[in-house]
Image (spheres, helix red, strand yellow):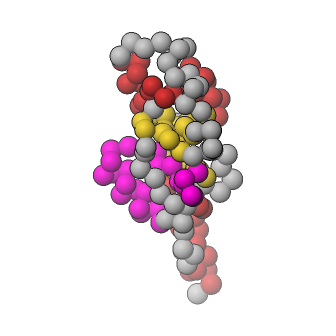
Amino acid sequence: MTRRTLADAIAGQSTLTMPPSATMREACAAMHARRVGAVLVVDEDGRLIGIFTGRDAVGALARCVDPATTTLAQAMTPNPATLPPDAEPIEALRLMRDGGFRHVPLVREGRPVGVVSRYDFRAMENLRIEDEIALWERI
């Protein structure tokens, strides 16, 4: 059976990144257009400095901020927990469970290469099942 890593979950993914100066409105519009639940916030060198999710948007709106003028720097979760892309899926699931969040940025040398969410593991489970079926068919 093939060893799966988080890199398998992000294969073909185009990660949504934005600068901390982007507004909540811009981020939410981009998330909606791309059908994703998170924006990775990066500095001018492309290094991860935060994550902005739907949960962050709801929290900011509950504080009655103006999404047209509130920047990601003001609304994001700074310094999120991360994993390298060669980590195993179970590590991400444990991190999400223990931290109470749904998205984990994958980072190599400080720069984001993708993001996994709980949803991504459905596809990985299907791949695992396909591997098992192929193994049984060879027997």
In the image, residue 15 above or below residue 59: below
Q: Residue furthest left?
A: 98
> What residue appears at the point 40 percent right and 21 percent down from the top-left corner?
60
| Residue nearest the viewer, comparing 20 with 58 | 20
Q: Residue furthest bottom?
A: 139
Residue 2 % position (x, y): 57, 75
Residue at image position (51%, 28%) is 72
Residue drawn at (48%, 38%) of the image = 51
Q: Is residue 91 left or right of residue 67?
A: left
The answer to whether residue 90 is magenta is: yes
The residue that appears at 65% across and 57% down in the rendered structure is 11
- Where residue 12 appears, as percent x and y from the top left, is 69, 53
- Where is 72 relative to 66, above or below? below
- Of residues 20 and 123, which is closer to you in this image? 20
Q: In x, y percent, where is residue 37?
A: 52, 36
Location of the C terminus (image quadrant): bottom right
Residue 18 in view of the camera? yes
Near-viewer residue (12 or 73): 73
In which quadrant of the rendered view does residue 126 lie? Answer: bottom right
Q: Pick out the residue farthest to the front.
A: 45
Q: How many marks?
A: 0
Between 119 and 89, which is closer to the camera in this rendering?
Answer: 89
Quadrant housing the N terminus: bottom right
- 103 within the magenta span: yes
Q: Position of residue 88 (x, y in %)?
A: 47, 66
Magenta-tinted stretch: 88-111
Q: Is residue 36 visible?
A: no
